[in-house]
Amino acid sequence: MPVSTRVRSRRLSAVLAAVGALVLAGCAGTATDERAPSTVAVPEELAQFYRQGVEWGDCGGFGVDGPILARSGAQCGRISVPLDYDDPDGPTATLAMSRIEADDERIGSILVNPGGPGASGLSTVLAAAGTELAGQFDIVGFDPRGIGSSDPQVRCLTAAETDADRAVDDGDRSPEGIEASEKRNREYAQLCAERTGEDLLAHVGTADVVRDMDVIRGVLGDDSLNFLGYSYGTRLGTVYAETFPDRVRAMVLDGAIDPEQDPVEEIVLQAEGFQKAFDEFAADCAVRSDCALGNDPAQASARFHQIVDPLIAEPAGTTDPRGLSYRDAITGVQQGLYSSAFWGSLRGGLSSLADGNGDTLLRLADLYEGREDDGTYSNINDAFNAVRCVDDQPVTERAEAGELDMRFRQTAPFLDDGRGTGEAPLDVCAFWPVPATGEPHTPDVPGLAPVLVVSTTGDPATPYQAGVDLARQLGGALVSFDGNQHTVVLDGIPCVDDVVTRYFIDVEVPETDPHC
């Protein structure tokens, strides 16, 4: 593909924006969870994991968001899970968790996941702070195995190697360019195996994470799961429902991934979603005096290429010595298209780039890539690759990769740099050291309680139709939201949040599908 399009969910900045509305409660003390244990029967060989306690305490040592969580009054803790559920007496992994305790009459816990895959889930609890849900449920976040503050971590590249990789032109579709790209992909896969270990890589996928989610349910003392999943988190919810259909109390899936979709079709549909988002952005930009794309939306794509494509030959200047590469410019633009809340930054970034300054787009790209101010990186990208390469069957034929590249360009012309040849390199998953385990399929969920799917009409990363299809597949209700953003639950839209809140509390889906 000419760009890297990823299914990502709740942008960290959007979650942290909720912090400003929090009433800071001070740091929570340390306490062992004394919830009554779950009564659900579990295999004896796994009982030690389901019955373990959690020592909840200060979040200060839990990643870059730890201090913010600590100031919010959230608590953090850790539990152990088997690395391989077929070998429960073997090596274990440690999962990091966060919690905002219910302050009214407690119904249970709601487990939340922000998506990715690869995103830390600890700060996601802040989106619910101060809401009616947080009054009646413990809101619990977690870093899935291999991710964030969980241990061991998936790590493939150092910070310096990641900076260097982002500067490389990966869009050359000549035979020499394709050979160079595949060489980098092979080396990356080899580094992942060497630095992470194949045992973790083989057990970092969705099938193992949903087993962890059930352990968390048991540890929290809940007989059934309440779950809120965004984007890739909808895949976690779907697979959990397939694995444990009788253990779901309430499940909200926002920004759906369609389990029936082939990953290749999913990429093409994402391209369509980003093109629609660009067109909406361009129309909004055209009526503003500071629009670098001009005042004719029909010419926006051509003007965009005039501004961005010269970076293929030479990066733009930035106050950061890295400069702005073409790849980072496209990444920054994609980040800006995830939500209309970012359109102002994107508009300013394109105007600055037209004047030769790439600072704003570089900052947007850094946000997407998980780069901190000190130059370190979260492991979101390495974990993203590790999970998707295990979950989805890779493209292993060069002809299919070339066809996908051309379809992507045709579907999202604003992202077509004009260098398509009908040939394309195999991506990193074609060289992954452990086999993929997932296949497109229709979920089989006998006896599943009614679920609630939320889908946004202008979602660029998880297009609206996927939510329509997932609601049908799971026999659930659908909430449709008219907007230009990726995911919406707990973003302060009463029409959506009221339905979600009533559903979690009363476990009743609306009689008719709401449209907000």
Image (spheres, rainbow, N blue to C red):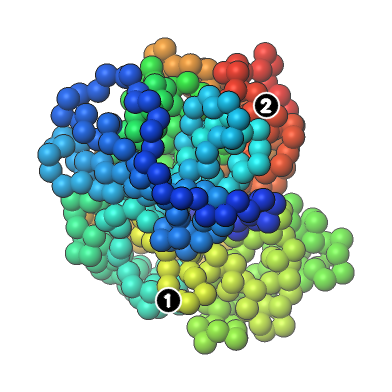
Please state the horizontal and vertical placement of residue 78, each as a whole percent of the image. 34, 47
Label pair 1/2, CB-CB below 8 angstroms: no
Please state the horizontal and vertical placement of residue 469, each as a whole percent of the image. 54, 27
Q: Nearer the viewer, mark 1 or mark 2?
A: 2
Q: Secondary structure beneath disc 2?
A: helix
Amino acid type assigned to the residue bearing label 2 in the image: Val
Query: How crowded is the residue under tag 1: few (<14 C-alpha within 10 Å), some, or many (20+)?
Result: some
Q: CA distance from mark 1 to mark 2?
A: 43 Å
Point out which mark residue 499 bears: 2
Q: Mark 1 highlights which residue?
A: 163
Residues 55 and 402: in front is 55
Residues 240 and 111: in front is 111
Q: Secondary structure beneath disc 1?
A: helix
Amino acid type assigned to the residue bearing label 1 in the image: Asp
Q: Which quarter of the rendered picture does the C terminus lie within?
A: top right
Please state the horizontal and vertical placement of residue 451, each as a whole percent of the image. 53, 22
Q: Closer to the N terminus: mark 1 or mark 2? A: 1
Drawn side of residue 15 relative to residue 6, left or right: right
Residue 361 to residue 342: above or below? below
The reply to whether residue 21 is visible in this rendering is yes
What residue is shown at x 57% (from left), y 18% (from top)? 507
Residues 454 and 76: in front is 76
